[in-house]
Amino acid sequence: MHQTLLATPHLVQVPEWIPPLFFLILAGACALLRHGRQAAEGAAWIARLCFALAAILSLPVVFAGPVRIELAVFGPAKLAFLLDPLSITMLVLVSFLGLIVTRYSVNYLDGDPGQARFSRWLILTLTSVLILVISSNLLLFTAAWIATSLCLHQLLIFCRERPGAQMAARKKFIISRLADACMITAVALVWHGRGTLEFHELFANPAGPHTGLIAGLFVTAAMLKSAQFPFHSWLPDTLETPTPVSALMHAGIINAGGFLIVRLSPLITQSPAALNALALVGAFTALFASVIMMTQTSIKKSLAWSTVAQMGFMMLQCGLGAFALAMMHIVAHSLYKAHAFLSSGSVVHLMRSAWTPAGRPAAHPLVVLGSLAAAVATGLGLASAFGLGSNADPGRLLLVTVFIMALAHLLWTLWSSSLRERLIMRGLALASAAAAAAFATHRLFEHWLATVVPAYAPPRSAMEYSIMILVAMLFLAVLVLQSQLPAWASRPVFARLYVHASNGFYLGTLFNRFAQKILA
């Protein structure tokens, strides 16, 4: 296994009076957000300032390399921020999403008596996430991790009169506290075994005592935070919350688990077993949620289940060591989901955005095979051109295989259209362009994050090869199921499975009963 360690950041010390001043300004700004629309507009202006500051802070990193800004020291704890390619990417992304969501909220909640309270908690949630992504040590990271969850909880229970919203918030609260416990335990073990919590010091020497346990705790916290099976049912239930909350959560906060894995990848890669477990859970979550998503009649429910599936696929990427690809996935998925949820008033647009177009007959098996063959030729050819051919790590080859199946889905969708004579050639061109753009962007992210994340390519055992082949076959089975679902849906066995799948196989119902007993 070859690793690229984090480049040593330049240290910048800030006068000690600045942190108290910052928090006084934040507290004063939140106190001023008192009156309805005025509060919402004030929150939007704060978000604009955050985005402008993120853009300014990115310049030194681009031109001079990583920077560590030390604000204050409290014994062994340090209030410090790390600005490197990874944190800057997330800082700009989150601040941009915050700008869009706060601006949308001005009109969305106009006239609501709770608009000022909503705006305050929205700004506090956004601030917590921004601190999370630029934290320079595990202690500040964990504090921001917990603060993000607690602030989000207040947004989830905004509609107190809706039992569904209250139940979703209750389930999320329980799962978040489990994730917090994992984080706190891991931080204590890191401090006990290494005597430091600073990222640049930990990454310079990632080996140490309790390596497997620490990696396992971080992986468990990430899976809990990112709605992985079987702790996933709270996420589709949060659609009872206001649309801006859904957009911020599905596009931003849900990615915290993936960011945790990428941020701490030099530590977590010391335990291949933890990464293998992450890949397995992620793959199962992606497949499980994809099947359920196909049975949803509500477009917003379908979008919510697609978020679960996308988080599972992102965890699969992390588990296979494709950390740069996972970051590319986070950015692309965040922008798409923010746009989809904030456009939820347009049914026509969402129907176009849905994964499975309505009213299409089952695809002929030869059409599926032909589409798959065309996708294999296109995908493998372009993957080889971008250095992701047969010599690449098997984990990355698995991800290329899954991407090829997505291209096949695009091609047979177009072939099944009544305008297939016009669309098939356009589809081949579109598939080629999409593959080239995806592989090129992947290479761009690998170059951008080369000094931040490790190059993880361990020797694979026969068992790992078998599991990867099984995962590829399961993704192929989902592709075939999609293509043949209209024809199979009338069969009694599939009709019964369809009903069970549309209800999430009742895991959400079981968790609801558990949550009611725990917090009764």
Image (cartoon, grey):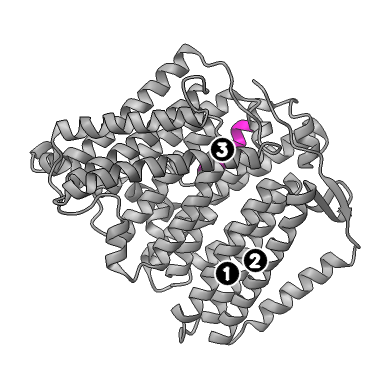
**Would you place residue 489 above or below residue 456 in this image?**
below
Which residue matches tag 3? 443
Q: For mark 1, does the 10 Å Cα neighbourhood hold few (<14), some (14 to 19), or many (20 or more) residues?
A: many
Q: Which residue is depicted at the point 65% across and 56% down?
A: 91
Mark 3 and 2 residues: CB-CB less than 8 Å, in contact?
no
Range of the magenta residues?
215-223
Is residue 219 a member of the stretch shown in magenta?
yes
Q: Residue furthest top?
A: 462
Which residue matches tag 1? 99
Front one among 252 and 357: 357
- Residue type at numbered disc 3: Arg
Q: Earlier in the sequence, mark 3 or mark 2?
A: 2
**Would you place residue 144 above or below residue 504 in this image?**
below
Which secondary structure lies at badge 2? Answer: helix
Quarter of the figure that contains the N terminus: top right
Q: Residue 17 has which mark? A: none
Q: Which residue is depicted at the point 46% across and 63% down?
A: 247
Secondary structure mainly formed by the magenta segment:
helix
